Image (cartoon, rainbow, N blue to C red):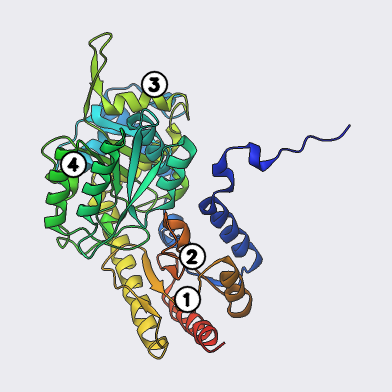
Amino acid sequence: MTPLVLDAGGLHPAITDPAVESVGFLNEALARYPDAISFAPGAPHASFVDAVDLDACVRRFVAHLERDRGLDAVRARRRVREYGPSRGIIGHLVAEALTRDHGFPVDESAVLITAGCQEGMLLAVRALCAGPGDLLAVVDPSFVGILGAARLLGVPVVPVPETAGGLDLDELRRLCRTARDAGRRVRALYVAPDHANPSGTVLDHATRLALLELAAREDLVLLEDIAYGFTGVPGAAPPSLKALDRDGRVVVLGTFAKVCLPGARVGFVVADQRVRDARTGRVTSLAGTMAALKTMVTVSTSAIAQAVIGGLLLQHGGSLAELGRLKAEVYRRNLALLLGALDRHLDDAGPGVSWNRPTGGFFVRMRIPVRADMGLLERCAREHRVLWTPMAPFYLGATGDNELRLACSYLDPPEIEEGARRLAGFLREVRTA
């Protein structure tokens, strides 16, 4: 009997999406060149991950359930071992932490705990984009996860170019008008206002206010990704979009992967918008609506993983800011070291080589005079033992073909210096070829 062979053309087109293929290629390159210095993964530093005492975190959270939530010892232990509610079991801690640290009040009923921020993106796009006439706008370049979520769901995506202030509001306004004229609508905009992945861009205060005003006028929902906000200089960033929001336009997407433990795969959504069922008259929160969708995706987020995150929050006084404070100092140090190393080793790189100078986040964005594709990455890894991430998959168009992304969060200072030296040698070789 001949085994079944499926034609890729007959499967969902997201399977062969360039963004998906690029992630697979990078993973393969890491495996083939284990001695390479990798500027590819936007991962927390291993020392922070290694320092987490998983058992102690779970015990601390179980004790909290008994002491502060009124559960007896048996029910508290079972809470972290059994299936849990789709909304999650640490929503109260997340709500308290955000209220304390981020300048906007959060009720537990508005919080949904997700299997990583990626699931939050998927659920938010699915809930908001109801039909073929709904479009998702994204700041271009944008995190590949939101692009992938939209493609999996078949939601058309339109790009809003970046500007010095963060994004082109005139273009967003034009996109909304063009969509209306065609009988469609831009339903939501995905934006990371603070040290965005991959660009490192920060939206200035005036742009945030103007964006909120435009969202109210055009009936947009703003999906605010706050993953990298903790890495900035304390007090330097403007208030979050959610803190400035007066019209209920902002849904917050967050993750514990960057601030503490990526292996837990725990994220969260804050969606306090009201949803009314016209048939029953029942009113719930958007978070509750998304929780209903979640039951058909992952059912619930791992209770053990949530207990670990809950224990870490409790260990740091229930504060996200305190949980991320020392880590942010290391990431800002690494970013400064990378920028300094690039200045030293690429001072004679010649025309066509440039890079931005972010003040936070995990990444530096570099432009080079040749196409930064998978073939060039393979050659760089093979001949110079240094890895990076092509920027093209982060764009909807072809404008990122000559750009690459350098991540510095995972590396130690000597690796950053040596990696910059190797990269400089490679770029000089490419330039003179």
The three-letter code of the residue at mark 4 reads: Ala
Q: Is residue 84 above or below residue 152?
A: above
Residue drawn where x is 22% and y is 65% of the image: 164
Q: Position of residue 201 (x, y in %)?
A: 27, 62
Q: Quadrant of residue 131?
A: top left
**What's the CA distance linking mark 3 and mark 2?**
47 Å
CA separation in Å, label 3 and label 1: 48 Å
Nearer mark to the viewer, of 4 and 3: 4
Q: Residues within 10 Å of mark 4 (few under 14, many from 20)?
A: many
Under mark 1, the amino acid is: Glu
The mark nearer the N terminus, 4 or 2, is 4
Residue at position x 29%, y 62% in the image: 328
Tell me the quarter of the image containing the C terminus.
Answer: bottom right
Front-lying residue, 261 or 58 = 261
In the drawing, what numbered circle is on residue 389? 2
Q: Residue at x 44, y 51 (%)?
A: 144
Q: CA distance from mark 4 to mark 2?
A: 33 Å
Tell me the number on the disc at residue 75. 3
Q: Callout 2: few (<14), some (14-19), or many (20+) C-alpha neighbours within 10 Å?
A: many
Crowd rating for badge 3 (residues with CA inside 10 Å; few <14, some 14–19, many 20+): some
Residue matched to label 4: 215
Residue matched to label 1: 415
